[in-house]
Amino acid sequence: MEGQILKVSLIQPNTSNRYPQHCLGLGKIAGMLEFHCHEVQIVDADALNLSVEQVVQIIKSFQPDYVGISVRTPSLGISVKTAEKIKEAMPTVPLIIGGPHVTAFSKETLERFSCFDIGVLHEGEYTMLDVVNGCPYSKILGLVYRESNEILTTEKRPLIKNLDDLPFTAYHLMPLDHYKPYPPNLKLPFIGYISSRGCPGVCLFCYHGLFGYEYRCNSAEYVVREIENCIQKFGIKSVIFYDDTFSLNRQRVVDICNLLLERKLKIQFRCETRVNLVDEELLRLMKKAGLVHVSFGVESGNQEIINEWKKGITIDQVRRAFRLSDKVGIETILAYMIIGAPSETEKSIKESINLMKELNPDLVQWSVACPLPSTELARWYESEFGKIENVSSLMYSNIYSSKDWKPVYRSKNFTSEELMFWVRKAYREFYLRPEYFFRRFKKTKNLRMLKMNVAGLKDLLGVSAS
């Protein structure tokens, strides 16, 4: 089928997310397929809140030659249900699964779920293109597939060295007006953006299966050119960078900021990074270029627990990063905190709560640890408590989790119920303080921020009542 124009449907399942985000992996694959003249449809059931039946009808009307579905471990159940209904309606169309789950459980996924014909492992752009172009499966790197009664896996595809070789993300195929940024709110419309892949960090809880440990990034010129393109085409006003560590390459961030300023691209942006990879000069430049929100992975207020997580940071570095971010006037500063390290104690949890009270950032997200597949944390958990049978129940439990849902995870000293108790207690103790209300009142400068604060208060009242 080389040279033949084919039709491909790509599906983001409906996970009932209160804050649906851009399906960036599917968007990159769609961009690659369109660049090679194939016709592509993205069905973002999450953003559009579509039922499985609605998804099937949309795809049937498109009459694709291939259907691809992106699957994360927590969304496995709805993904399989969607795939099974599509297979019933279109039994001859090859159904392809991609994403972190099949990468972690390649053969097992196809053995358990007969609805999937092919699995695309790790980075999917070139692998998916080879499949659609009709290359023999056995010759395609990074693939798991069925042949007769066997499930076969090919050699791993090398990581993409130069991300600038990839076409732009196919945002035009997404329902851009249906995406909602997590609090704090940004000017709309916005786009999510991943400008780098791979993380050299060795944190116990991080999954590296999809992008690996080797850091690779788009050039500053590529990033700013794509942002400029989105401003011109879609009128975007904000960008959320989902890079694991945005400032890992400091000079690249400097170049991105300078290009945004030189081209007078007036956007807001937010990013996540490490406390040991920022300084006052860099933060001032980022703020000048549009940074309004920065998030730091702190995880704990106890140095021994931070070391156990293998974060490679110190509490002094945490204090310095938060102080500098506040000093230069970043609108919102967020800390990610995890409760439930293997050696977590009541004392270490209280130290975490006390550190956050001391730093008094704008937002803190408290979560129960999650033993994602193929992580060091999952290996520790299974050595202590046995195999996790229901992997689809894995997710980070935080303020946005259902009150009726409890995490799979437990630690040496706490049950899952006890860990959820401490997460809710941490939320109450941090947010329901006069000092916190005073800080938020001082920073509330417009209606957008007022609405954000009201929405956050509603969430907190829900936590307090549970």
Image (cartoon, rainbow, N blue to C red):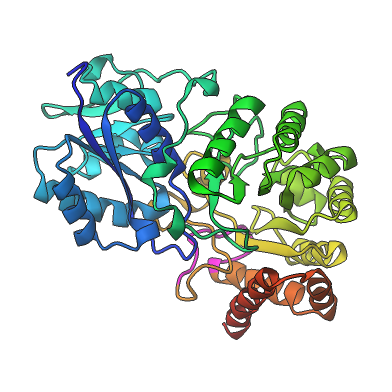
Q: Nearer the viewer, residue 259 or 368?
A: 259
Which image quadrant for residue 135?
A: top left
Q: Nearer the viewer, residue 72 or 294?
A: 294
Which image quadrant for residue 377?
A: top right
- 188 on left or right of 264: left
In the rendered view, tell whether residue 27 sits above or below residue 214. below
Please give the name of the residue rendered at 69% of the width and 46% of the height, measured from the top-left corner.
Answer: 266
Q: What is the quadrant of the N terminus in the image? A: top left
> Is residue 223 in view from this perspective?
yes
Expressed as whole percent of the image width and height from the top left, the position of residue 317 reads: 86, 45
In the rendered view, tell whether residue 204 sits above or below residue 155. below
Q: Nearer the viewer, residue 237 or 407?
A: 237
Expressed as whole percent of the image width and height from the top left, the position of residue 447 reads: 68, 73
Q: Is 390 inside the magenta-drawn segment?
A: no
Expressed as whole percent of the image width and height from the top left, the position of residue 273 reads: 71, 43
Give the magenta part as a residue range: 405-416
Considering every residue shown, the one lying at the far bottom of the view is 465
Please give the name of the residue rendered at 54% of the width and 66% of the height, measured from the top-left corner.
Answer: 416
Which image quadrant for residue 7?
A: top left
Q: What is the quadrant of the C terminus in the image? A: bottom right
